[in-house]
Image (cartoon, helix red, strand yellow):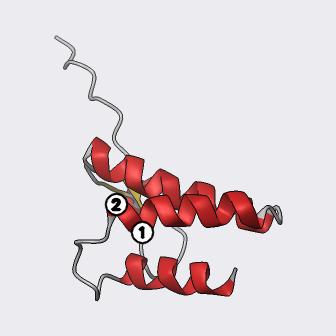
């Protein structure tokens, strides 16, 4: 009897570099709310790369507003604040 199919999980890459084969990947569950917040940051970054500083600033502000009560030493929050300051 075949086992039931496993749901697809997001994959986390090693901090040592991009994995070279599937055996080096580790599945990670990310709550959907966190993914939504991180998507806002990625949209801000994409807008900044495209040179649309107005949209980028608005997206960064949305992200930073959502994270206003977070611990200030979270690396992604520190990076987002630095990126926003450069706009």
- Quadrant (top left, top right, bottom left, bottom right) of the C terminus: bottom right
Task: Estimate the x, y position of residue 35 in percent, counting from the top left.
Answer: 38, 49
The reply to whether the C-beta atoms of the residues labelled 2 and 1 are less than 8 Å apart is: yes
Residue drawn at 43 percent across, 57 percent down: 38
Where disc 2 sits, the SS reads: helix
Task: Estimate the x, y position of residue 82 in percent, counting from the top left.
Answer: 54, 87
Label number found at residue 52: none
Residue drawn at 39 percent across, 59 percent down: 25
Question: Would you place residue 44 above or below residue 69 in this image?
Answer: above
Question: Would you place residue 70 above or below residue 20 in this image?
Answer: below
Residue drawn at 59 percent across, 60 percent down: 58
Residue drawn at 19 percent across, 20 percent down: 3
Task: Estimate the x, y position of residue 85 in percent, counting from the top left.
Answer: 60, 86
Residue corresponding to mark 2: 66
- Quadrant (top left, top right, bottom left, bottom right) of the N terminus: top left
- Image quadrant assignment for residue 64: bottom left
Depth order, front residue of 31/78: 78
Q: Is residue 20 visible?
A: no
Where disc 1 sits, the SS reads: helix
Question: Circle 1: is it few (<14), some (14-19), or many (20+) Cα within 10 Å?
Answer: some
Residue corresponding to mark 1: 64
Depth order, front residue of 21/55: 55
For the residues labelled 2 and 1, the Cα–Cα distance comes to 5 Å
Question: Would you place residue 71 above or below residue 41 in this image?
Answer: below
Q: Furthest residue to the right?
A: 51
Q: How many marks?
A: 2
Q: Is residue 74 visible?
A: yes
């Amino acid at each position: 009897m075949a086992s039931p199919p496993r749901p697809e999980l997001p994959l986390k890459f090693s901090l040592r570099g991009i994995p070279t084969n599937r055996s080096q990947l580790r599945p990670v569950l990310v709550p959907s709310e966190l993914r939504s917040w991180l998507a806002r940051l990625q949209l801000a970054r994409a807008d900044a790369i495209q040179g649309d500083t107005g949209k980028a600033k608005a997206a960064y502000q949305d992200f930073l507003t959502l994270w206003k009560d977070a611990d200030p030493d979270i690396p992604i929050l520190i990076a987002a604040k630095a990126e926003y300051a450069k706009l």
